[in-house]
């Protein structure tokens, strides 16, 4: 689709909880001839608005204040909403490309890209290709092949959660991580899960090693950012 065609511009809904970033995107996209049909600052509003508007493209931040952007993408995909979702993040992690695109999103990129680069990515996705900063654009058939290959590699070393997300943690480690994000101490986690405090400590050491973080706070933030646990 040629964005210079003002009679049939690409329609876009922006989902981000920072008003300044929203406004910057709006100005940049409309400058390039695209049409921003709506903006949402949280997941629940986005879900309602996207269902009603069904824009060509949804630019969605992963770190929303209520529903994780990856979970929201999965929900819209399950509802067969035709809008193509591009997930954006301020903390781009190439290791999470598979996880984020598996949600049903068509693109995954960082907020550090230029307006011109973003427009090209939007055009590419609107034309029917999958894109991410650390992989070449792919047709749906190429993407399915890539996805199957990546999942076969990841599944050798990771477990799959009940929501279908691959993470490098065991079910017990996910339970402990969930408790951690709720602000529980090791003693409280042990009581809640009916295990010893030493067992909790051992699992915490394993979790921090697998996630390559230095403390409990970083582990909790990593889990929340990637949608492995709910807020």
Image (cartoon, rainbow, N blue to C red):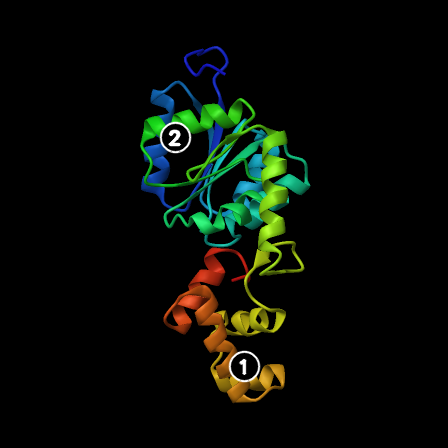
Residue holding disc 2: 118
Q: Name the residue under label 1.
A: 189
Q: Which secondary structure lies at badge 1?
A: helix
Please provide percent x and percent y for residue 105.
55, 39
Task: Left or right? Give the position of 5 relative to 45.
Answer: left
Residue 72 or 161: which is nearer the viewer? 161
Name which residue lies at 48% across and 77% down: 204
User: How far is mark 1 from mark 2, CA to CA?
Assistant: 44 Å
Depicted 45 relative to depicted 120: above or below? below
Toward the viewer: 211 or 45?
211
The answer to whether one can see residue 152 in this image is yes
Residue at 52% in and 52% down: 68
Q: Is residue 112 left or right of residue 194?
A: left
Q: At which x and y percent is residue 220?
A: 45, 67
Q: Which of marks 1 and 2 is nearer the N terminus?
A: 2
x 45%, y 64%: residue: 211
Helix or strand or loop: what does disc 2 sit on?
helix
Q: At which x and y percent is residue 3?
A: 43, 16
Question: Crowdedness of circle 2 by 10 Å Cα count: few (<14), some, many (20+)?
Answer: some
| Rendered image quadrant of residue 167 | bottom right
């Amino acid at each position: 689709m040629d964005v210079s065609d003002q009679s049939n511009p690409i329609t876009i809904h922006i989902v981000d909880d920072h008003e300044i970033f929203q406004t910057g995107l709006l100005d940049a996209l409309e400058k390039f001839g695209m049409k921003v049909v709506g903006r949402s600052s949280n997941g629940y509003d986005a879900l309602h608005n996207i269902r009603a508007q069904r824009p060509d493209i949804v630019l969605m931040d992963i770190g929303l204040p209520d529903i994780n952007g990856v979970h929201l993408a999965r929900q819209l995909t399950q509802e067969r909403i035709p809008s193509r979702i591009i997930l954006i993040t301020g903390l781009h992690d190439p290791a999470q490309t598979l996880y984020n695109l598996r949600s049903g999103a068509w693109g995954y990129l960082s907020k550090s890209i230029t307006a011109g680069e973003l427009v090209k990515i939007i055009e590419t996705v609107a034309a029917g290709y999958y894109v991410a900063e650390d992989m070449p654009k792919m047709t749906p058939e190429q993407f399915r092949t890539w996805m199957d290959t990546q999942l076969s590699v990841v599944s050798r070393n990771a477990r799959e959660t009940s929501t279908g997300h691959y993470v490098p943690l065991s079910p017990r480690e996910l339970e402990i991580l969930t408790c951690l994000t709720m602000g529980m101490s090791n003693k409280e986690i042990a009581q809640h899960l009916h295990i010893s405090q030493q067992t909790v400590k051992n699992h915490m050491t394993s979790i921090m090693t697998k996630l390559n973080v230095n403390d409990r706070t970083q582990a909790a933030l990593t889990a929340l950012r990637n949608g492995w646990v709910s807020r």
